[in-house]
Amino acid sequence: MTLQQLLYAVTIADMKSMNRAATALYVSQPALSAAIRDLEEELHTELFIRTNRGIVLTTEGEEFLRYARQMVELQGMLEERYTDRAVKKKFSVSMQHYSFAVEAFIKLARKFGMDEYEFAVHETKTSEVIENVRNHRSEIGVLYLNDFNEKAMRKIFQENEVEYAPLFQCGISVYLSKAHPLAEKARIAFDELKPYPCLSFEQGDKNSFYFAEEVLSTCEYSQIIKADDRATMLNLMVGLNGYTLCSGIICEMLNGDQYTSVPLDTDDHMEIGYIRRKSMPLSLLGQQYLDLLREYRP
């Protein structure tokens, strides 16, 4: 088994196509196929299934790729550290839909600049935050735990070989438009929200209560609307007097000044934290990003 074979396997898995991977790697398709065939024979394991629609990883292949990605990334880190090649360092973050986490990312990119670093940010579904960290697509994933989801989520973290650490705790707030009839209240009781639609981020196939981005996801809501992105959510707040339950940390720089948060009248709370791959040290940018996130502590 060679590092070249591992790189080949990772590229095929990412591109889901032998032909596209061969083009990206500057090798012929027959040579790439032969290298993967030799690797599979050495491992006595089928890594890929060839279909008319492209390449699909087997269950064994998914497990193998987790380790292969680590080796390929470690090789890249060694090359960047000990060679003179002008290769940009990469830093990627995945997160639930938190504007403060995006704002912290912007501050980080401004501080370090984009001449030396290649940045990526993924504001996405909870399951994809975990998957991106597990697969090394992102170094850090930002999400929350509370009394309801903590036990299940910690089990999911363990199964995906990621570890969780807290950043800060906060209360629960109602996020809504400043034009909303409840926007001027000092606190909002849960029953006062019944006439208005609750807005919730769509979680796709993994639409478990444990993956919900909104706290109190098991409560009964007379009206509920699912959305895929933060911009749509904000439009629904203005157009339909919708609301969502959140940490109460808002960023006017990104979302504008049309919105506000009002504390919910409850003793419940949430904990904002982050996940990373087990046993993988944080990069300098990773440490700096976490420091920026901690500045949002209420």
Image (cartoon, rainbow, N blue to C red):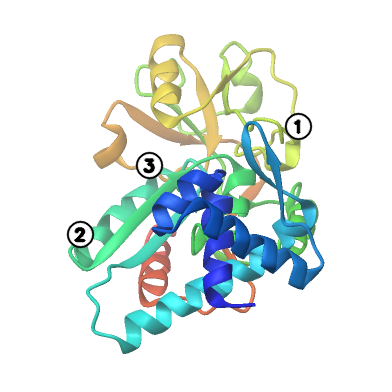
Residue drawn at point x = 50 percent, y = 18 percent: 242
Amino acid type for the residue under numbered disc 3: Ile
Say if 71 sits above or below 159 in the image.
Answer: below
Say if 126 sits above or below 34 in the image.
Answer: above
In the image, 167 versus 18, the foreground residue is 18
Tag 2 residue: 110
Say what secondary structure mark 1 lies in: loop
Q: Horizontally, is 271 left or right of 298 in the view? A: right
Rendering quarter of residue 108 = bottom left
Tag 1 residue: 218
Residue drawn at point x = 49 percent, y = 59 percent: 138
Q: Horizontally, is 37 left or right of 104 in the view? A: right
Q: Position of residue 77 (x, y in %)?
A: 41, 79
Tag 3 residue: 250
**What label sits on residue 269 in the rendered view?**
none
Q: Position of residue 244 (x, y in %)?
A: 53, 29
Structural crowding at the residue carrying mark 2, measured as other residues with C-alpha within 10 Å and reported as few (<14), some (14–19) or many (≥20): few
Regarding residue 100, the answer to whether it shows in the image is yes
Residue situated furthest front in the rendering: 30
